Structures are given as structure tokens and as C-alpha cells.
Amino acid sequence: MLGYKIFYNIFETRLTRREVITILYDDIEFKEDDEGNSDEFNRYLLYKYSTKQLIYTGLDHKQAENEAQQLILSHADNLFGKNSLAVQLAMVNLEFYCQYYLQDTFIPKDNNTARNLAPVHLEVWQELEKMFIEDLYDNEEFILPRGCSKSTIINKALSCYLHCFGKSRYTIVIGNKEDDAVQFVADTRKMLNNQYIIKSFGKLIDKRSRTVNKQELELTNNSKIQAFSWGSSVRGTTYGCKDGIFRPSLIICDDVLSEDDILSDGAKEKVLNKYYKEITEVGDSEVIRNGKKIKSASKFLVIGTPLAPDDFINTIKEDVTFKVFHRSVVNFDIDKYFEDNQYWQRYKTILMNTKISKEDKDIMLKEYYIENKDYMEFPTIWEKYSSDTLAKKYFNKRTAFMQELMCSCENIGEKWFKSIRKQSVQEIEFNTFIKTMLCLDPASTTGKNSDYCAFVVGSKAENDFKYVRKGIIEKLSFNNYCNKVIKLLKEYPDITHIYIEKNTYQGSDVIKIKELIAKDDELKGRDLEFINEMQRKNKDQKISSIVDDTNSGAIIFNKEDEQFINQFQEFSGQNYTLHDDAADAVAEFANRIDNIELIPKLIILDRRDLGL
């Protein structure tokens, strides 16, 4: 009756989807053959998703059920074959496609080890429908926890869907290593070569007539899936067949980052350059004729977990051309939860007890968790993640847990400065200072995500304490930054040394500041020594040298400098801190003030004063 036409109209008009209560089949028993196939179950899936699809058109539940029954009856002679009702439904419903055509991967059966799908997996498929069926946008990033099967539910399932229906002529997937590429092709090949797909779409894999190897999968419908490692080049890649030459219509970057890619700013920049200058260029733009789109633009998917605040994943997250789908392993403040739960704190005490053998500890932890499970179990994104396993990962290595499972790099590192001693300006200036210097860490730009210019007026007092008399972080242009230096020199006439990091302006700022000093009547006669050196030492090593002095109160801060102190306190290591300007400048001051030498002023005495 309604057949393909109603499903096609749903796609064409892009009707807004409603929240529909999923019909669960947990309590329904279906008979399976030796291969795990159940005709009853397949018909149930067809009925279930036909009903849901009809509800999306505006029918109420009862009407949708009746229409679904009529659809199935009218297509009784071809429910699952070529051009069948199943094919028509799958074309406009990715979830049905995955549940039926890829059921050996996604449906728990007696002959497999599949887990039940979680709501997050269905949400991902709904996102992909908007992108590939409704064509609402071209770029999306999926940030999901490690172990969430993101490669399977996105890369492999989507590739199978797109190539069964010829929606993509050429798909490329880029993984971190060659082994990742090889595994993707092997798994996708196996998924496409199942009985359900063959029955509806024919045999898509034929090694005798098509290119099929470890990283290439050419299908009999004149389309191709190919995998690359991050280290290989995709520049200019195309697929040619009798129908023409095609550029990639889908480009997927799947967990391309490794730890080496976040070790330095240069490493991070290299990844971004490869993506924006090479990978984005392999796609194609949309084709519009007479105001109508006849060919969609290439689609880009970025999938992964962040490793650092300004790494590739987090940079793409800020890219306004990308829609972002971001989920964590739990949807609450995990730090506060563990800290406030007395049972987990007791669990942690047992876990960290080094006097208990590993074998005994495992038994004790298991017994304790079972006894108190009602007070300790918490909801997670998927049944795969058990509460006790997650807790062990959290307590053993919180940083890795926050990165890989919470998918967050904001404040994930352990803060280095746990106690900061602050005094008022009056208290600080009451001291007698024996050495004073100005330390500068300039920034080259004033953009939203750029570094700050950091200024520290620091002194060492007679009491042997070090004082950050003034701490400033501001985003300043070159001229404003140089003028700020002049202003501080006037405010603090006891400054004798000025340290400026050379990396940014290569000494041109020192020349400019000296010119300004020479033109200023108040400063031109002042004896100032400039230290302008390249920054080559590892920042973490340098900043770590002031942790003990800061936490013990030997370095004292001006409590009025709230913005500066807040940034300083957030330092959690270079890889896990977005801005380290304040910490870097304080470290330069604290490490250098001890080594600067003051030349005593020469006092000329009158001989008559000595009675000569």
C-alpha cells in the first residue's frame, strides 16, 4: 500500500523526528537456526521499525501499527529480497539497517558475544541519519569514550550502509596506524559479506573481478572503501571505474592522534596542518543547478578522544563548521561523586594499601563491592562499563581516566600549586627588597585562543622570601606590550633587571623598549640590564622547580592580582593546561632572582670629611 513512497517522502520533506518509546524485545523469545537466524525476529524488526517510521510522519501509535501490518501484508512475497520492503525501509532508517542487515554484529545471539546496544549508539545513528539521509550538514565530530565501539557503530556500519545503497562511491577512513587501517577493512569486508546483505543487495565482494586487499575494498556495485594510516598521504586520491572518476564523498578521521602528537606545540601544529592543508582538500564541493542541489559536498567525520586542551580533537571542537556530538562515560561530576561517597573512599583505601598482596587485595575489593553494591553502583553510558572497573581506573590514573573516559582535558591534570600564600599590597611593600626584576613572557597574537603576555615584577626581600609584587596577564599587541613595560618600570623604580623570552619577537621587542626608554626623561638615565634568551628548557621541568617553594609559602603573591593567580593555580602540566603564561613567568622570576648580581654604587667621600 504505502510501500517505498511513504518512506521516500519522509526523507524528502525532512520531517522533525519525535521521541518514540523503543519497543524492547528482551522478553520475547525467537527461535533461531544453527546460524543464529530467526525469521520471526526479522519480521518483528520489520514491523517494529515500520511502525516507528510511520509514527515519524504524524500517525498515532495505533494507526502506525495498522499501517505497518498492511505494509508487511502487501509486501509478503518480498519482505527481505532485492527491492524489498526491508530495503526501502533501510534506505531511510539507519537504525533498522544496522539492526537487521548487521544483526550478527549488533544483536546478542546464542552464537555471538555482542552486547546490548546502549541509547548512545542509537543517538549516534540518529545523528548520522541527519547527515547522510536528510543531508542537513557536512561536518561532524564524535567525541566518545574509549571502548564505546565508536569505530564499529560509525565507521564500519556507516560504510556498509552507504555502499549498499550507492550513497558513497568512494569512502576513505584514516586511522592512526597501518594496523588500524587493515583491521577496519577486514571487519567491514566481513560485515558486508553476510547472508542478509547478500539476499537484498547481491554479492558485493568478488576478489576475482575487483581490487580487494588489506587496505582496499572495491565492491561489485562500482564503489570503493579504502583505509589509510595517518602517516600516509591521501593527497589527490580518487577512485576510477567504468562510471567515471570519483573523489572521496566521505572522509573519516578515526582516533588519528597518538601521545607523540601532543608532546609540543610543533607536533600539534603538524597534525592541524595535515588535516586542513591535505585531508580537507581531497573532498569535493556540492553541485547546484538551477537552484537545486544535485550532488552533495563531501562529508567529513572526526572521531576520537582528546589528549590535550589544544590538540586536534579540541581544535576541531571549536571549528564552527563542525557539529559536535560529545558524550562521557558518566554524565555527572565524577570527582565530587567519588570524594563524597564513603564506600568508594573505603574502597580506595584498600586499593592503595601496599601492605596487602595483589591476590588478597583483589578478593577483598570484590567482596567489599558485592556487599555494598547498592551504595556504590552508578549509571554509565553503556553496560560494558562496570562501576568497580571504572573506579579502579580512576583511582589508579585519574588523568588517563578523564582523558579517555570522560573525554575531557579541562582541569584533568593534578593541579601543581595546592596552596598559594597571598598578601595585601601594604603587607608586601612593607618589606625591604634587596633585588627586583621584571620577567616577561610575550604573546605574538591577541586572538581568542592565543597566549597571554605575562608580566611579573618580582623581588627578593631581606627575610629571604620571594614576592610577586605585581602579576599581570593581558592580550596585547606589540606596541601596547612595549608601552606596558615602560609603565611598569616607572611604577617600580627599584627594577634593575628585565628578562624577556626571545622566542616570540627574536629581540625586536628589546630594541623597541630601549628606544622608548631613551626617549623618556624619567627612565633614560636609569641603569637597566636586559636578559633576552631563547626558551629551550622543558616548561614542566622549569615550573616544577617552584612547586615546593610555592606550596610552602616561600613565594608570596599580591592578592589583588586575581586573574593572574587564577591562571597560575590552574597549572596542571603543559599538556593539560591551556594557558601556562603566569606559571612560566613566575618560574623565570623565582629561578633567576637568586642569580642576578647587583653592582654596589661607588660612594666618593670628601677627604675633609675624613679629617685629612
Image (cartoon, rainbow, N blue to C red):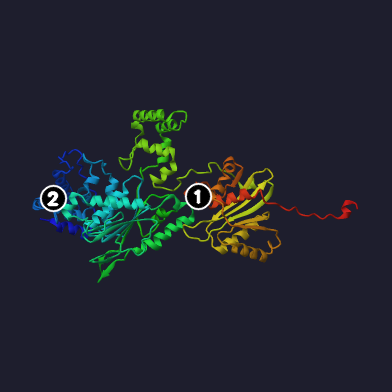
The residue pinned by badge 2 equals: 68
Image quarter of residue 231: bottom left
User: Which of the pair 194/545 is nearer the observer?
Assistant: 194
Q: Is residue 270 left or right of residue 91?
A: right
Q: Amino acid at mark 2?
A: Ala
Q: Is residue 142 left or right of residue 69?
A: right
Q: Amino acid at mark 1?
A: Gln
- As helix, strand or loop, the secondary structure at mark 1 comes to helix
Query: Residue at coordinates 86% horizontally, 55% vertically from top-left?
Result: 606
- Whether residue 468 appears in this view of the structure is no
- Whether residue 288 appears in this view of the structure is yes
Query: Residue at coordinates 59% horizontally, 59% vertically from top-left?
Result: 484
Q: Is residue 28 above or below residue 449?
A: above
Mark 1 vs mark 2, CA separation in Å: 58 Å
Query: Residue at coordinates 43% horizontally, 60% vertically from top-left?
Result: 273
Q: Residue extending furthest front?
A: 208
Q: Quadrant of the N terminus?
A: bottom left
Sequence-wise, which precedes: disc 1 or disc 2? 2
Q: Residue extending furthest right?
A: 612
The residue pinned by badge 1 equals: 574
Q: Are marks 1 and 2 in contact (CB under 8 Å)?
A: no
Residue 580, x across and y down, in percent: 52, 51
- As helix, strand or loop, the secondary structure at mark 2 comes to helix
Q: Is residue 97 above or below residue 295?
A: above
User: Which of the pair 249/604 is nearer the observer?
Assistant: 249
